[in-house]
């Protein structure tokens, strides 16, 4: 099925109407920030940083943190660092967080940890949940970033609503058309640390082309070169 999706525009694994759509836009991400965060976490136990697009990244090396503080204190340090990171990032509105830990039921369209552009031991650490990271964004900040990129976007997920797999989260309008983001695409933007300007240009191309009747999964030029 995956080969058909690439070769003859067949359906993707997952939702029945999911299709790869070539955007023609070169892919870019901020996964270098994840590499830097883990390099620091290996020495100090954990690292927090702000990522372009008003996203908040926290990386944790569980063995290193346990050796430095002990597991109980490491847990306290994790929660304290996360709280301070959110305050520093000034996220407003609904907060959405995705993390790598214990993510065995991950979206089938997402790249596996083993091909992330990290050191082999770090990929293994993600698979084994001894290295974990979380990325958080908020509704107001995300819509603001999309507006900066020239997209007419609206957050449509109701406050307190469950983020079900196919429930719309963000609606984007243009060229007389409308596309919606659901769980899988938000997960992609966070865990892949996709550059939001790049992603916005891809969505603009989707709106120009029109993909009525399908659940489009935008594919970016040279996207495969990001992965190991």
Image (spheres, rainbow, N blue to C red):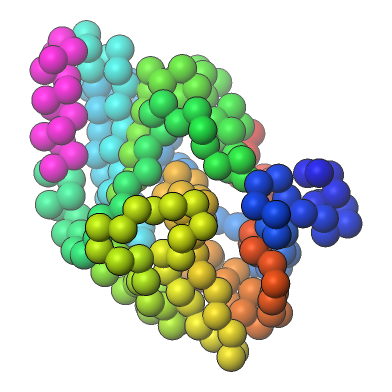
Residue at (30, 27) in percent of width and height: 60
Q: Position of residue 5 (x, y in %)?
A: 80, 52
Specify the segment rendered in magenta: 69-83
Q: Is residue 134 left or right of residue 152?
A: left
| Magenta-drawn stretch contains 163 | no
Residue at image location 65% in from the left, 52% down from the top: 15
Q: Position of residue 69 (x, y in %)?
A: 14, 13
Q: Please tell me which residue is depicted at 69% across the width and 76% down the height of the picture.
A: 212
Q: Is 177 in front, or is 29?
A: 177
Residue 72 magenta? yes
State which quadrant residue 143 falls in.
bottom left
- The overriding secondary structure of the stretch rendered in magenta is helix
Is 11 left, or right, of 25 in this rendering? right
| Residue 38, above or below 90 | above
Figure check: 89 above or below 150: above
Q: Is residue 194 visible?
A: no
- Look at the image and tell me in which quarter the N terminus lies: top right
Q: Is residue 58 above or below residue 154?
A: above
């Amino acid at each position: 099925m995956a080969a058909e999706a690439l070769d003859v525009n067949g359906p993707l694994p997952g939702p029945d109407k999911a299709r790869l759509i070539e955007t023609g836009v070169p892919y870019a991400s901020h996964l270098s920030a994840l590499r830097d965060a883990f390099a620091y976490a290996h020495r100090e136990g954990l690292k927090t940083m702000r990522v372009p697009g008003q996203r908040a990244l926290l990386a944790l090396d569980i063995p290193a943190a346990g050796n430095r503080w002990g597991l109980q204190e490491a847990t306290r340090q994790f929660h304290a660092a996360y709280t301070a990171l959110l305050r520093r990032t000034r996220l407003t509105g609904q907060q959405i967080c995705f993390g790598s830990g214990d993510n065995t039921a991950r979206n089938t369209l997402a790249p596996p940890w083993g091909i992330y552009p990290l050191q082999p031991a770090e990929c293994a650490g993600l698979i084994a949940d001894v290295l974990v990271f979380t990325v958080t964004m908020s509704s107001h900040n995300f819509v603001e970033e999309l507006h900066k990129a020239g997209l007419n976007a609206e957050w449509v997920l109701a406050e307190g609503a469950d983020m079900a797999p196919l429930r719309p989260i963000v609606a984007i309008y243009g060229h007389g058309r409308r596309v919606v983001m659901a769980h899988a695409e938000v997960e992609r933007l966070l865990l892949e640390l996709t550059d939001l300007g790049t992603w916005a240009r891809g969505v603009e191309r989707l709106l120009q082309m029109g993909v009525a009747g399908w659940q489009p999964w935008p594919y970016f030029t040279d996207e495969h070169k990001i992965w190991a």
